[in-house]
Image (cartoon, rainbow, N blue to C red):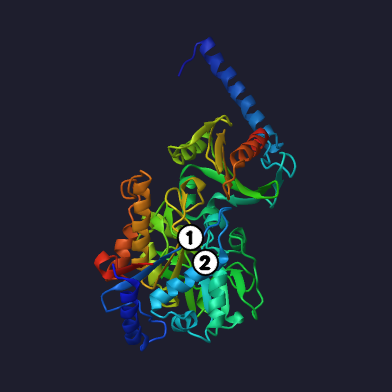
Amino acid sequence: MKSRRDFLKTAAVGAAVIGSRSNIGLAAMLDAHSSRVVIARDAALYSADGSVDEKRIADLLDRAIAAYTGRDKPIEAWKRIVPVGKVIGLKINSVGGKAIATHLALTLAICERLQQAGVKPGEIVVWEFSNSAIERAGYTIATDRNRIRCIGTDTPGYGYEEQPQACGAVNVHLSKILTRECDFVINLPVPKDHNLAGVTFSMKNPFGAVEHPNELHANGCNPSVAELNSLPAIRNKIRFTIGDALSSIYQGGPQFRPETLWHPNALIVGEDRVALDYTVWQMIEAKRAEMGLQTLAAVGRPTTFLTTAAQAKYNLGTNDPNRIQRMEI
Amino acid sequence: MKFTSNGWMLPVWFSLFAAFMGMMVAVTSTTGCKKKSVDPFPATGAITGWDKTSETRVYAAKDLYQYIDGDAEQYISAGVVSTSTSDYKYQGKLEATVDVYTMGGADGARTIFEKGQTRDAQTVQLGDAGIAYSQSVTFRKGPALVRITAYESTPNAQAALLALAHGIEAKL
């Protein structure tokens, strides 16, 4: 594993090369054949009473983004991530309720950094599939277009596209928040065991952009995960992931199960959605082994969607560990 | 087909009896004389220390994914009819959610109940069967499967959850 100093050096070179093409290309691809995943940890995120320390989350976010972009100044780093002047969506994950949803403190920290990087409040949309899900996760609905919005697709005036899109064998209707409101979306999934797909993280979170995601659940969500992430609106807009791995569920997910809750105390950052999901799969398998549980494949929930998504046909990213540059800080 | 006198009489009485039973079924179904639907959620103050802090939300089987995403599939396979959920708070601090899954029959409740257990589950006397952890209680009673989940771990959480569980059981 590279040291942070070595990593930042390499990242800076990568950023110079890739960044010249696009301000959102970042340093994710150090060369054409590898993807970067940063896992930033802070063991002291949770205080004794079980609440999260908001200041430490913001600091952890800065460290994660600095490591990923190779830039120590958060504002500079964020300017390389998001296209200023565009509408930035933050796709949270609220399934499971507030104990296992994207932490509000993390979302607020990202909103603050976005504004410091020049994004106006009215250009930030925190979103999820429904208002009730958002509220269950501890967020408050906000619909004023001049301020940071926090909305579900069922908010009056939004809804789903009338025109369906073919997603493999299923026709799906995408959220208008994704298709019409957002130019660029930061994905904020939560890593969890999933009773159908094996694990849920980066590529599963966009199921919340679909009107009837249950229609994509067949066969362990395979190939629907790959098909959905290949749709232009999702592939081209949901480009950057800041995974909220402060908490996770290693068995019995995606619902909240306090008996199988654990705290990786981490943020997982990257652009390659397959590499991100591969990394989370490995983390969850390791935790299951530690707790004496069988592998996901052994209990009939292999993560075959990962293999499919990595196929050239979909070209969504890599699940080859030799091509994933995993950096733990 | 020929019948003896007794043999002929038997089908006549049997037919009359069957017709009578059919009428009774028709009457009970049209007059609403059927099992009363129950509200299993204790009101604020009904269980010492517990406040009901949200409206009860109800999901039909086809909409259950909106609440529990992929978990819905196992409930649907086990015959879930509807799911009701409400939030509670104990002594103004400990937050919990109560989920009541109404299955098509007791077998469905048993299927889900037995699936969700881990080795450290503690058996408790609730309904037809119950288990508890430090932050959750699950039990089944007839076609109902009830799960109560607290969002934090406190020294008295399990005792408080069990008290709430007994209150729900009594209403089922």
Residue at image coords 61%, 70%: A150
For the C terminus of chain B, the image quarter is top right
Q: Is residue A128 visible?
A: no
Front residue of A213/B55: it is: B55
Reading the image, the residue beneath label 2 is A57
Residue at image coords 47%, 73%: A62
Q: Secondary structure at mark 2?
A: helix
Front residue of A199/A167: it is: A199
Q: Is residue B124 visible?
A: yes
Q: Secondary structure at mark 1?
A: loop
User: How far is mark 2 from mark 1, CA to CA?
Assistant: 9 Å
Q: Which mark is residue A246?
A: 1
Q: Is residue A181 above or below residue B29?
A: below
Q: Residue A304 appears in which quarter of the rendering?
A: bottom left
How far from the left and from the top, in percent, is residue A51?
58, 57
Q: Is residue A218 above or below residue A308?
A: above
Residue at image coords 29%, 62%: A307
What kind of residue is marked 1?
A: Leu
Say which chain tag 1 marks.
A
Residues at discs 2 and 1 in contact (Cβ within 8 Å): yes
How far from the left and from the top, in percent, is residue B122?
50, 34
Say which chain tag 2 marks.
A
For the N terminus of chain B, the image quarter is top left
What kind of residue is marked 2?
A: Ile
Are both tags, 2 and 1, on one chain?
A: yes
* A307 relative position to B42: left or right: left
Q: Which mark is residue B10?
A: none
